[in-house]
Amino acid sequence: MSISVAVVLLSGSRVSIELDPDSRLEALRTKAEAALGTHLGKLITEAGALLKNQGTLRQAGIRDGDTITAVAGHVAVAASTSAFALIRTDGSVVTWGDPLSGGNSKDVQNQLQNVRHIQANTGAFAALREDGSVVTWGDEDRGGCSQRVQRQLQDVRQIQASSEAFAAIKADGSVVAWGHVDTGGTCREVQEQLKDVVSIVASDGAFAALRADGVVVTWGSVNLGGDSSAVRSHLSHVLWLHGGPVGFAAVKAGGRVVYWGSDFDPDERIHGVYETGFQDIQQIEWFANSWVAVGSDGRMSIWGKYNISQCQGVVGVKCLMDDPLRLEDCDDIGSAAVALLSDGTAVAYGHPSQSSVGVQEQLRQVVQIQATGDAFAAIRSDGSVVTWGLQGVGGCSRAVQMRLQRVRDIQASLFAFAALRDDGQVVTWGDKALGGDSRSVQRQLRNVKCIQATEGAFAAIRGDGSVVTWGSSVDGGNSRKVRRQLGRTQEDDQMEAEAKAEAKAEAKAKAKARAKAKAKAKAKAKAKAKAKPKAKPKAKPKAKVRAKAKAKPKPTPKARPGPVPLKRPAKR
């Protein structure tokens, strides 16, 4: 029996899609795109969860009558590590941020027309146009220059990215790769095997392609999953793939998982076949040198560094964000994970610094979890938010707790959070210099529909399609040079100027108050020192007095006068 699902664009356009509950999520996206006549970006459930192209409608918890919110491709913002790229309604592109990470697209600006999707890695962008051609810019070594393969980049259907390379699937199922050779920028050695490819996933330094016959082909860094020779005999009849930061997992029928990668230390290589015992698997994640799988029946299993085989009622898992630019030790990558349970509670696993013990009693009726590099934020059903982890990067939200009400979505940079409320307002916290302080643009953050992030900045798309940014200027937080292209008006300029003037006055007042307090403390200390009576000379200890007396030379005694001699009387 089929179910009816409504797919709604932010513009208000709405279509009803009829599908079998066991249909793949990709089928929902394809039908919705055809009905709406536009390429779709994010698909978001009523609970605020982001739908991935993995599993079925039933596994994702989608029921008859549900409404899915879709973000149209032409109102999407893509982000590299330190730059943004916006697809405007006319299919043109605006970029800003670090020029070395793709923030400057002037060399290819004339080619950036009729763009329907943009893929980004850490330092470059690849734009897929309506005609199937591809335009690239950014760091040349990281895929910003595709001149070597430009003639092959025609009839492209999909683009995937590792940290420093790109891989494109063409309409005929062949694959084209470019970028840094060590991170998957060339697939020459396996080119003949890359036929009838239906999907590609990436780790930070390698790619894994799934063919229509269920066979998996890999290339790229041998330390990051590019070498699958240890498990090659098991890489057939694969249903779907997942790419973690340092390796891959291939899901097969009956809950079997084939995994490989993480070869930084020969003694800690993780590869093999794991039997989860689940009928089917709806989610796979990597954290702290371990893999975690969630079955459609709510069971969760963790293997690797951590081994946990019996956990029931799990809806999904969220891991800490990883930073591919600081990839040194597998144990540091996603060092903690949080499992969201069907009863609305949440349980944390992994590094003690991200333990939820201090807020465990508050983790009730949780509907969504988001993470920075070292902190978590959970949205509860009443729209309130609970945070934990390292305080400086979002683990402490006390300063904004009163405003964290009616929150429907949270976006994260590597160091801060941005919460989107039902009324379209935004609340931020975390590292102030890296997106945690939005006071300079707070008045402009109205009617916000969605938020995107680089490592240290945020970009908010408003209902009219205009964009407001804040955070580190080198990470794209300053978009003043392209503000008109981003749809900001003179009124926005005025609000920004007023906010800056207020911030300056506030900083001046605080500095004055600190100086006054310092002067007052100094005067008080001076007065106290002046009023203090002179100390009496200390009495000398008796032992000292005796020693001094003993050492003093004794005076020579005066001779005492002797007795007066009696005189004899004279003889007569």
Image (cartoon, rainbow, N blue to C red):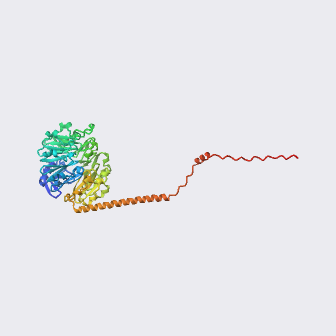
Give how far across and how far down residue 364 sits, in percent: 28, 52
Q: Quadrant of residue 443?
A: bottom left
In this rendering, position of residue 558 left or right of residue 401: right
Give how far across and how far down residue 113 sits, in percent: 14, 53
The residue closer to the viewer here, 572 or 18, is: 572
Give how far across and how far down residue 198 sits, in percent: 14, 44
Residue 14 in view in this figure = yes
Q: Is residue 546 above or below residue 505?
A: above
Q: Quadrant of residue 501?
A: bottom left
The residue closer to the viewer here, 389 or 143, is: 143
- Tell me how many marks there are: 0
Residue 468 in view in this figure = no
Residue situated furthest left in the rendering: 172
In this rendering, position of residue 537 left or right of residue 80: right
Residue situated furthest right in the rendering: 572
